[in-house]
Amino acid sequence: MKKLYTIILLALISFWNAIYLTIAAFKFRAWEYEKLICDINDKLSCSSLFSFDFAWIFWIPFPEIAMIVYPLITIIALLGIFKKCKKSFEIMFGLWIWWMLFNSYIIYNEFLLWIFCPSCLVCSASITTIAILSFIWIKNKT
């Protein structure tokens, strides 16, 4: 049960991070530049990434896609807490695989440019932790 509460906490933190980055991306696209919390220098900068095409998928910034994934993870974890979904960890692990495939595209491009988004790295750590907790639960159930 503690794992599910931890997953909810990580998903909510990542969701608010995605909201922050989505708003920043749209401001950047509207030529309203502002220094973000995660803009540390030229190489560690979230706003620098928004000027590249890979940061926009189907004309929306990639953090906006995270605004779908993290609430979905939260709902699945809540269903697990209330015993409405017996396979919540398996579903979250499946979401992790999909999300990491998507996220690896962003991280790959960050490595090509050698510009990294600290907030994105935090979200990557968050989703990896969710996957590890899910995997541990699945492994312990069998």
Image (cartoon, rainbow, N blue to C red):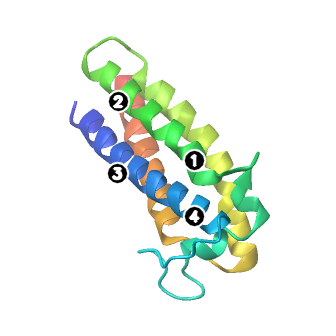
Element on which disc 3 rests: helix
Residue 56, by quadrant, is bottom right
For badge 4, the amino acid type reads Lys
Disc 2 versus disc 4: distance between alpha carbons? 45 Å
**How dense is the environment of label 2, judged by Cα within 10 Å: few (below 14), some, or many (20 and up)?**
few
Front residue of 9/27: it is: 27
Camera-nearest residue between 72 and 91: 72
* Quadrant holding the N terminus: top left
141 left or right of 101 in image: left
Q: CA distance from mark 1 to mark 3?
A: 14 Å
- Residue behind mark 3: 13
| Spatial separation of the CA atoms under disc 3 and disc 4 | 21 Å
Q: Which residue is mark 4?
A: 27
- Disc 2 target residue: 140
Residue 27 in sight in this render = yes
- Assign a secondary structure to mark 4: helix
Nearest the eye: 62 or 134: 62
Q: Amino acid at mark 1?
A: Glu
Q: Between disc 2 and disc 4, whose residue precedes?
A: 4
- The amino acid beneath tag 3 is Ile
Q: Secondary structure at mark 2?
A: helix
Q: At which x and y percent is residue 116?
A: 59, 74
- Please tell me in which quadrant of the rendered image residue 83 appears: top left
Mark 1 crowd level (few <14, some 14–19, many ≥20, 10 Å Cα): some
Q: Describe residue 80's horizontal placement relative to residue 107 as left or right.
A: left
73 versus 59 height, above or below: above
Residue assigned mark 1: 64
Q: Is residue 1 above or below residue 113?
A: above
Q: Which residue appears farthest toward the bottom when viewing the image? A: 41
Name the residue: 29% across, 44% down: 9
Viewer can see residue 116: no
